[in-house]
Image: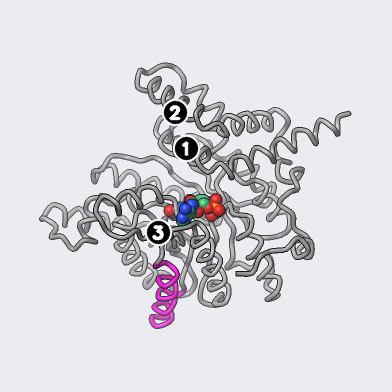
């Protein structure tokens, strides 16, 4: 795998070190707030302790919602409703960054709850249609399908009558979502989840692609490159798209469920589907993006990553192949509140960039926020990177005031 050298970065005229651009949208107060949030998240023990007390206080109905809303919620979420995200959408758009509204509420496992999630997803598609700063919509299949049924379906266990009826109803929800996306020409990401339901998700995705991706890529499947088999899966998906004459929509990620995957493989005594080392994941991620780029006529893709090396590699390859920075089939995406140094510098350089903007009532998005905090404190490298960049910008501004 080719490594990016500093001279190549210079040749691209792109730097992820430019904190002035990265944090230009934050005033001093907002910058200091982010600084303190990442300072706390840098301390693993404090995150564990804080998570424990927040869970306890929420359980006891202590009035801490305001505090959460003014701190981590504001850092990582757009608002409690679609409308409440308007200022975030506008602020990102002022820096040429798109928004991907992500309804992050994990509802109950019943058809009523799935129906109401489906309605909310339809609203995000309408919103994307009405606002050119929203290039994609997104959802998780487990928001509209029962996870146990997806799992049984994949394991080829016989579904009972009720399960079969629920599965068919959820499939109608899926079709309705994809149909609206196609009618309104809003590109739609379907997130990837755990390996024991992912084959079912893949099959459903390809069925939708075969219907809705005839003229362009509307439906995008997600490929987790931490999985040993994923590069082959990506190549097979491409062949299938060629044979059946549709466009392949690809969101490339490393994968978010590593601990769960390893634990289950260990408990059920099958070999882990995940690369043994991070270097294996990194290698496949970078090969995956090269594969997509080589087949850009058929594959429309987005890399969802906070990894600077992978982002630079894609920029470098686009440069080598003389592909326009704002080529409509290529996107970079990060999560709101993270890796602004990547998002804002890429956008300032003319690349297509979007941020996932999670939203939902504070109490309902808490599981998402806990995961963010845990992930940030466990990936020490990433948090200390965020923290170092914020620190750099705080002192740059202080020096400028002198
Ligand atoms: C816009 C966007 C959309 C996303 N959508 C999804 C989605 O649909 N489904 C999903 O699962 N995730 C999704 N993610 C999360 C993503 O999969 C990663 O968990 C996260 O982005 C961290 O990886 P990275 O590429 O940013 O960077 P890095 O920090 O360089 O990589 C961290 C990742 O490397 C892998 N890794 C770490 N240690 C090891 C190890 N020892 N062995 C093997 N691999 C290792 C893991 O995947 C880990 O998450 C999304 C992320 C973004 C930014």
Task: Using the image, tell me which numbered label, if any, was put on residue 182.
Answer: none
Q: Is mark 1 within 8 Å of ligand 1?
A: no
Decide: few, some or many residues near mark 2? Use Cα within 10 Å; few <14, some 14-19, many ≥20: some
Q: Is residue 125 left or right of residue 159?
A: right
Q: Is residue 175 visible?
A: no
Q: Quadrant of the N terminus?
A: bottom right
Rendered position, 401 above or below 131: above
Q: Position of residue 55 (x, y in %)?
A: 39, 25
Model colouring: one colour
Q: Position of residue 332 (x, y in %)?
A: 59, 58
Q: Position of residue 21 (x, y in %)?
A: 75, 46
Q: Quadrant of the C terminus?
A: top right
> Residue sitting at 43 percent across and 58 percent down?
276
> Residue sitting at 28 percent across and 52 percent down?
145
**Residue tagged 1:** 374
Front of the two marks 3 and 1: 3
User: Real-space Cα distance between discs 2 and 1?
Assistant: 9 Å
Q: Is residue 354 left or right of residue 198?
A: right
User: Real-space Cα distance between discs 3 and 1?
Assistant: 20 Å
User: Real-space Cα distance between discs 3 and 2?
Assistant: 28 Å
Q: Are marks 3 and 1 in contact (CB under 8 Å)?
A: no
Magenta-colored stretch includes residue 217: no
Element carrying mark 2: helix
**Residue tagged 3:** 274
Q: Are marks 2 and 1 in contact (CB under 8 Å)?
A: yes
């Amino acid at each position: 795998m080719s490594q990016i050298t500093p001279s190549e970065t210079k040749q691209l005229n792109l730097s992820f070190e430019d904190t002035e651009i990265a944090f230009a949208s934050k005033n001093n107060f907002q910058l200091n707030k982010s600084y303190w949030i990442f300072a706390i998240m840098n301390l693993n023990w404090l995150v564990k302790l804080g998570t424990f007390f927040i869970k306890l206080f929420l359980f006891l109905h202590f009035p801490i919602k305001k505090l959460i809303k003014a701190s981590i919620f504001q850092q990582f979420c757009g608002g409690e409703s679609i409308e409440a995200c308007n200022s975030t959408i506008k602020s990102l758009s002022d820096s040429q960054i798109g928004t991907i509204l992500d309804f992050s509420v994990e509802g109950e496992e019943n058809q009523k709850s799935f129906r109401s999630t489906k309605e909310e997803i339809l609203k995000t598609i309408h919103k994307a249609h009405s606002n050119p700063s929203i290039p994609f919509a997104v959802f998780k299949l487990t928001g509209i399908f029962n996870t146990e049924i997806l799992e049984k379906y994949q394991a080829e266990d016989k579904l009972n009558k009720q399960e079969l009826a629920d599965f068919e109803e959820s499939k109608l929800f899926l079709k309705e979502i994809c149909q609206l996306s196609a009618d309104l020409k809003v590109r739609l990401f379907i997130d990837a989840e755990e390996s024991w339901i992912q084959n079912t998700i893949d099959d459903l995705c390809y069925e939708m692609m075969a219907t809705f991706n005839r003229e362009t890529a509307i439906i995008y499947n997600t490929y987790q490159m931490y999985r040993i088999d994923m590069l082959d899966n990506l190549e097979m998906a491409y062949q299938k798209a060629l044979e059946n004459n549709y466009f392949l929509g690809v969101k490339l990620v490393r994968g978010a469920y590593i601990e769960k995957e390893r634990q289950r493989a260990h408990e059920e005594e099958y070999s882990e589907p995940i690369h043994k080392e991070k270097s294996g994941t990194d290698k496949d991620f970078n090969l995956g993006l090269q594969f997509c780029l080589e087949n850009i006529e058929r594959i429309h893709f987005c890399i969802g990553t906070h990894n600077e090396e992978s982002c630079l590699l894609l920029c470098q390859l686009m440069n080598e192949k003389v592909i326009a920075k704002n080529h409509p089939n290529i996107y970079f995406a990060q999560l709101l509140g993270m890796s602004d140094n990547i998002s804002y510098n890429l956008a300032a350089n003319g690349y297509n960039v979007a941020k996932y903007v999670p939203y939902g009532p504070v109490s309902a998005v808490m599981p998402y926020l806990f995961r963010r905090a845990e992930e940030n404190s466990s990936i020490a490298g990433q948090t200390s990177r965020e923290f170092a960049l914020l620190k750099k910008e705080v002192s740059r501004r202080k020096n400028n005031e002198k």
